[in-house]
Amino acid sequence: MKLWRFNGGLPSLAEHKNESVNLPIECSNVPSKLVYPLRQHIGNAATPLVTVGDKVLRGQKIADAQGLISAPIHAGSSGVVTSLEDHLIPHPSGFSAPSITIETDGLDTEITHTPCDDFRRLSVAKLVALIREAGIVGLGGAAFPTAIKLDNQSKARHIETLILNGAECEPYISCDDRLLKERAERVLQGVEILLHMLGAKQAIIAIEDNVPDTFKSIQSALANNANRAITAVQIPTIYPTGGEKQLIKTLTGKEVPSGNIPADIGIVSINVGTVHAIQQAVIDGKPLTSRIITVTGEGVNTPHNLEVRIGTPISTLIEVCSGYTHAAERLIMGGPMMGFALLNDEIPVVKATNCILVASKHEAVTEKLAMPCIRCGLCASACPANLLPQQLYWFSRSEQFEKAENLNLFDCIECGCCDVVCPSHIPLVQHFRYAKSALKVQNHEKHLSDIARERFEAREARIAKDKAERAERSRKKKAALKGKPAKEEIDAAISRSKAKKQTNTESKS
Amino acid sequence: MHFLTSNAPFIAPQNSIQKMMLWVLIALAPGIITMIWQFGYGVLFNIIICVSTAVAAEALMLYLRGRHIAPFLSDLSAVVTALLLALALPTLAPWWIPFIGAFIAIVIAKHLYGGLGYNPFNPAMVAFAVLMVSFPKSMTVWMLPNDLLPSGTSFTDIFSIIIGSTSNNELADAMTAATPLDDMKTRLSLNQTTDEIQSASIFGSLAGQGWQWVSIAYLLGGVVLLFKKIISWHIPAGLLSGLFVISALFYLFEPGVTPSPTFHLLGGGAMLGAFFIATDPVTAATTLKGRFIYGALIGVLTYIIRTWGGYPEGIAFAVILINMAVPLIDHYTQPRVYGHK
């Protein structure tokens, strides 16, 4: 299969897969406490369906989707709801947010599931509803509600190609890799469900060429599979090839037009972990209550690939990994390129958590002195979106945000390539995040002031119109009066009233 | 357990200014060695005076501007500027020429414009141009290649000429000569043909005795920089092809009275300019397409200045003039962003 090349990227980024790639998936124990932030997906926060003191079972829906772009949340084990208050959530700024806390009872009692023998008998609408009800969101890290991506019936789009993203390009992470190695059949069944739903002609499973064993296991699974529409492809290991836009370019040569989604060019791309969750939801009838997470880095004694109940505090995972080493310096959720550092390990894992990296001092830079930009252009050569990071930096730093926006700041995927290659050690991505949020605030304020101005102008127009109408009426009246001589009119009125008076007095007497 | 937070990416930077500058210095080594081999130790005096003046001026300016001295001084950018200036200066120039030059480069062309990363003009070339305009006579005292020197020229002779302690003007005259570029220009204006001119001993086999080998050594160093990805190929390729194409055109139409492209490429500072001077990232265009255009414009302008201008060598003026066009070039050569038409 012909492959294409996106601009730049980091072909020689240290992959750090060896630490965890050969460790089979193990099940983590059920913690004494599970914490569920109500917003762990893109869109509206879920609405709680339980109150403090309620008993819940594993798989029971504890919070429901609110609006179209949202997802329900299910309990990961049986127990009692102990709190509906704010709890620290995985967020770069260390925010707390409304969360449901469950104290588990250790019984792990499950609700009854209704498995499905033949998904082909189910209508697409029914399957979309099923996936939505199962609370499935993009498990690659974006956490976008998957049902919306798959709900293709209502839209006039024609999906040609389904891309299964198994390109785990971030260093250290190996959860998708292990999944493909150990549960290839389940993933393939998930792919068949998606092909059935989307009516796509072909499905491509993309795997980086640094994990040849995984490719082999997928290929042998494919050999036993009758569906010829599914193929597996090895792609060059170049960070960030697992980025949706970069992967689409690599596999199809097409680019997703700026501001559009892949479906607009006939492509749907889904992470393999998400496909596994879909298979579990459709075939076994199980909602999303657990996921696979890589716990790694020099800061833990024994790195693991763990199947974890969503909601488990990170401290529990660290215990499974025999605790911290003395080198533990940073607690990072996600990979070292796009992840974020956490304040403490009481924070729970959420649906989007694919990795807990406990980094040592030399695995995660803590201090770097930024020198002035020397305009070397290495950032532009490394940018997978083909942007000019150094120009964006110039305008972001001088707060000329509109100019940065004109240079397509919002096409930045924040992959961090520019940061890593910068000889001046400028935290470029940080500047871009700042500029983006400043622009969002600015645009929102502009939107509000536009509305206010429209309202004001409408009011002014209405008042002016009223005034004009009144003026017109009085003008007409005056004109009508002018038509007859006023004196005559008054005399006529006086004589009329006199005559009336006279008749009145006459009749009285 | 509590942790400190910081922002992604957490991967340590793969590169540093110091590393890039160090590679430039390493890549200059073949050129410097060839220079000493062909033209004697004069260039070493230039290097020593330029580098020490530049480093002192850099430290002084950093101090006056209240900047961190250690990280900025150790980035080696001042050393690179000084070295490029030293290599462009005549090998028998009096000691105050490199001194004033290095001072102008660092204090005026670099720090008064905002220091590292902010100077719009190449500091070494600004200094060179100022010296060229202000002290034209002292800027022509190039030493003869070793092969052509009067026998018995000693190290102390060179030293005494540079510090100006000798009154032996005959010795100095015997040791210096016009550069091939200079000689070519002068004699062409006297209606000599290129064949007549190039039969003189200073022209060597290719493009000037000594000069040709120095140029080839710079080319080698440039290849190292390309290989180490310190520079991209666009600027040198643009500059050399610009110079080649225009000189080849005139050579084809007016042979005999026009020097060959080989002479233009190897007879002067074209290689040093193409790989080391025009590639100064701070003052060059930044987009890939823009860099090729930037290089090509310098190449063409160099030819124009060499041929019709008032100076035998045009690299310095061409670089400074095209530095001015950089914002314009960058504006019109932006790459197509992913997902845009």
Image (spheres, coloured by chain):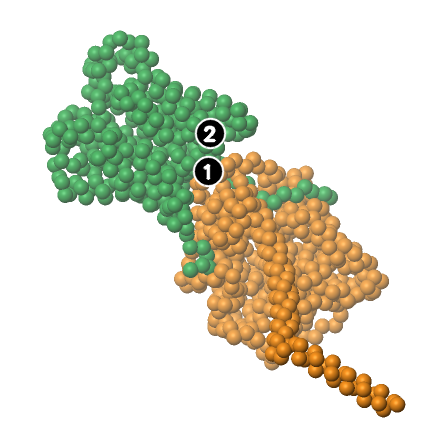
- Give how far across and how far down residue A461 sits, in percent: 61, 66
Q: Is residue B327 left or right of residue A404?
A: left
* Rendered position, A498 above or below B146: below
- Visual hue assigned to chain A: orange
**Residue A475 or residue A175, whichever sits in front:** A475
Q: Classify residue B269 by image quadrant.
A: top left
Disc 1 is attached to a residue of which chain? Answer: A
| Residue lying at 81% horizontally and 58% vertically, measured from the top left | A83
Look at 76% across and 62% down and name the residue there.
Answer: A77
Q: Residue at x 56, y 35 (%)?
A: A369
Query: What is the three-letter code of the residue carrying label 2?
Result: His
Name which residue lies at 78% across and 63% down.
Answer: A78
Q: Is residue A63 above or below residue A393?
A: below
The residue that disc 2 covers is B111
Q: Are marks 2 and 1 in contact (CB under 8 Å)?
A: no
Which hue is chain B drawn in? green
Q: Of residues B203 and B28, which is closer to you in this image?
A: B203
**Quadrant in which the C terminus of chain A appears:** bottom right
Residue tagged by mark 1?
A374
Depicted A228 relative to depicted A438: above or below? below
Mark 2: few/some/many CA within 10 Å (<14, 14-19, 20+): many
In space, the residues marked 2 and 1 are separated at their CA atoms by 14 Å
Q: Chain of mark 2?
A: B
On the image, the x and y values in percent for residue A107 come to 80, 63
Residue A24 visible in image: no
Amino acid under disc 1: Ile
Question: Please, which residue is most extreme toward the right here?
Answer: A509
